[in-house]
Every structure is written in structure tokens, then in C-alpha cells.
Image (cartoon, rainbow, N blue to C red):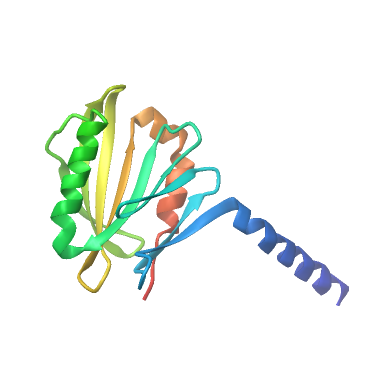
């Protein structure tokens, strides 16, 4: 009985610590299709179609956006403008279909350059039901991505469909 109380107290204490370690998001806000977790030490910001996040050194950019399928062209146009604004050279993307945690996804990978040299940008499209789509964006050069690899892997590993 004594050990059970200690284990229970430890579990409760752990639950109080856990929320400080990450920020959880349900996407889209209304009738969500996925959940994901962003490290607590990353700065998050609400943007036009969703949320963006960056580590404290701002070396990597991550965003998750959502729109109705009929607005995907507008969202893609906004992202093209974003690439231009951030001096990311437009190149033809490599397109691949792949599941991410059981969610069918289309990945557009741009191996390109920005003001700092070689960089990679990925736009990942996921179905969100009800004629909606989710787009995840990741931008950073290989060195920056490697430096923040554990956090990026954690974000992608946290993506869960809501069924």
C-alpha cells in the first residue's frame, strides 16, 4: 500500500511537470483532424491560417496551417510569397506521397538556397476531412535541422489523427 501511494504521488507530480515541457495544438481549431506538440522552449505565434513555431535561436521555421480544400491555391500562393519574402530561391519541388503516423501525406521538398546558402523547405499536405487540408512547413539548412533534429522529430512523432 505504501509503495502504491509513492507511485501515485510520483505520477501526479509528473503530470504537473509535463505541461511545462510542451505546447499541444489541435488543428484545425474547430473540428480538429490532428493534434501535435511543439516544444515549450519554441516561440509560437498565430498566423493567418494556423500557427508557426521557432526555436529560441530562430534557426528553423515550422508552421501548421489549415484551409478548406477550395482555398488551397490561395494558401499555396501565400507560401510562394513567403518564400520570395524570405529570399528563398524558387525551384521545382521533389514530390512524394508518404504516410506520417498513419496519415496519408503529400510532401513537396524544395532543395534550394536562401540568403544564408543551401536550404531545404518542405510543404506537407494532409487531409483534414470535411473538404479541408492541413499544410505543415519546415524550413532550415541541413546544419540547423540537424541541430534541432530531436525537436523536429519530436514534433512529427507527436502528430496524431483524431478519429
**Residue 115 visible in the displayed image:** yes
Q: Is residue 127 left or right of residue 21?
A: left
**Residue 111 visible in the displayed image:** no
Residue drawn at x 25%, y 47% as measured from the top left: 123
Total marks in image: 0
The quadrant of the picture occupied by the C terminus is: bottom left
Q: Is residue 84 left or right of residue 40?
A: left
Q: Is residue 123 left or right of residue 63?
A: left
Height in image: 25 above or below 40?
A: below
Question: Picture coordinates of residue 2 (x, y %)?
Answer: 88, 73
Residue drawn at x 33%, y 65% as measured from the top left: 102
| Residue 157 location, quadrant | bottom left
| Residue 104 location, quadrant | bottom left
Residue nearer the viewer, 96 or 161: 161
Question: Picture coordinates of residue 93 (x, y %)?
Answer: 15, 41
Residue drawn at x 16%, y 42% as measured from the top left: 94
Height in image: 35 above or below 75?
A: below
Question: Picture coordinates of residue 156 (x, y %)?
Answer: 40, 53
Amino acid at each position: 500500500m505504501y509503495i502504491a501511494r509513492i507511485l501515485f504521488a510520483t505520477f501526479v507530480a509528473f503530470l504537473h511537470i509535463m505541461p511545462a515541457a510542451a505546447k499541444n495544438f489541435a488543428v484545425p481549431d474547430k473540428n480538429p483532424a490532428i493534434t501535435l506538440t511543439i516544444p515549450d522552449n519554441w516561440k509560437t505565434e498565430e498566423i493567418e491560417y494556423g500557427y508557426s513555431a521557432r526555436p529560441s535561436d530562430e534557426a528553423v521555421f515550422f508552421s501548421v496551417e489549415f484551409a478548406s480544400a477550395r482555398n488551397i491555391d490561395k494558401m499555396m500562393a501565400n507560401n510562394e510569397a513567403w518564400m520570395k519574402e524570405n529570399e528563398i530561391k524558387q525551384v521545382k519541388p521533389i514530390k512524394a506521397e508518404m504516410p506520417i503516423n498513419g496519415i496519408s501525406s503529400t510532401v513537396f521538398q524544395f532543395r534550394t538556397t536562401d540568403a544564408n546558402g543551401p536550404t531545404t523547405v518542405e510543404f506537407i499536405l494532409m487531409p483534414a476531412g470535411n473538404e479541408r487540408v492541413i499544410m505543415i512547413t519546415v524550413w532550415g539548412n541541413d546544419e540547423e535541422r540537424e541541430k534541432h533534429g530531436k525537436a523536429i522529430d519530436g514534433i512529427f512523432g507527436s502528430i496524431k489523427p483524431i478519429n
